[in-house]
């Protein structure tokens, strides 16, 4: 199959209403729905499983964020719309850079930053998480390759970043 890059025409950025509409179009209220019941221990899918690798979760509540002074890459603890609890690394670059800049560059206390973010996420009007499966890898020899669940994007309405992105930190 041949792809002609010149066939793509930019029409500018979408507004908040259009962006949220795109998120809602294919969103789910439970993580189990996204991965068709193949998610094991609320954290991984066996490599090669015939299921989607990415999905959008609506009706989500952030319970906590793990953030340490040494490891500033955050982990999100959240509940889906069915009340199931998950603890996943966040690979969302904007959140990661915000945490890194706050703790490492600005010297802020990691607990203060964590509390600020948890409060922020708990008080937005609407929150969506983009969840994805990492590439297969074997964490412990002999257990077999697994694709681990991670948060790949965090979207809030109103926008918790005030139109900033990862390059702004």
Image (spheres, helix red, strand yellow):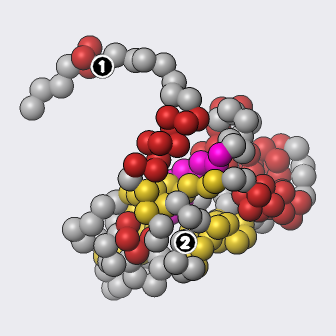
| Residue 158 in picture, x, y percent from top left | 69, 43
Element under label 2?
Answer: loop
Is residue 155 part of the magenta span, yes or no?
yes
Instruction: Name the residue: 56% across, 29% down.
Output: 15
Does the magenta stretch mainly form a helix, a strand or a loop?
Answer: strand
Could you say whether the residue bearing mark 1 is in a helix, strand or loop? loop
Q: Nearer the viewer, residue 144 or 25?
A: 25
Region of the chain picked out in magenta, as a range = 150-157
Examine the rendering and report whether any part of residue 137 can be seen.
no
Q: Position of residue 63 (x, y in %)?
A: 70, 72
Name the residue tied to disc 1: 8
The relative height of residue 147 versus residue 18 in the rendered view (above or below) is below
Above-or-below relation of 137 to 5: below
| Mark sitting on residue 154 | none
Q: Is residue 168 left or right of residue 30?
A: right
Tell me the crowding category of disc 2: few under 14, some 14 to 19, or many 20 or more residues within 10 angstroms, Cα based. Answer: many
- Depth check: 8 or 107 in front? 8
- Name the residue at 42% across, 17% down: 11
At 72% from the left and 53% from the top, the residue drawn is 124
Whole-percent x, y for residue 53 in the image: 34, 60
- Res 126 seen here: yes
Quarter of the image where the C terminus is located = top right
Q: Please say whether residue 3 is one of the residues in the magenta stretch.
A: no
* Sequence-first tag of 2 and 1: 1
Check if mark 2's residue and mark 1's residue have beta carbons within 8 Å. Answer: no
Please give the name of the residue rendered at 54% of the width and 50% of the height, measured from the top-left corner.
Answer: 153
Residue 10, percent from left and from top: 40, 17
């Amino acid at each position: 199959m041949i792809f002609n890059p010149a066939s793509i025409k930019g029409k500018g950025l979408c507004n908040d209403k259009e962006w949220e509409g795109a998120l809602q179009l294919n969103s789910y209220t439970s993580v189990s729905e996204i991965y068709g019941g193949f998610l094991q221990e609320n954290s991984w899918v066996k490599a090669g499983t015939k299921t989607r690798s990415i999905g959008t979760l609506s009706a989500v509540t952030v319970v906590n964020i793990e953030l340490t002074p040494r490891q500033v890459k955050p982990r999100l603890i959240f509940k889906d719309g069915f009340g199931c609890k998950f603890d996943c690394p966040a690979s969302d670059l904007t959140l990661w850079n915000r945490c890194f800049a706050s703790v490492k560059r600005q010297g802020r206390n990691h607990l203060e930053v964590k509390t600020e973010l948890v409060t922020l996420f708990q008080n937005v009007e609407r929150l969506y998480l983009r969840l994805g499966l990492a590439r297969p890898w074997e964490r412990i020899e002999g257990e077999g390759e697994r694709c681990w669940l991670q948060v790949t994007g965090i979207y809030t309405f109103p926008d918790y970043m005030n139109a900033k992105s990862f390059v702004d930190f």
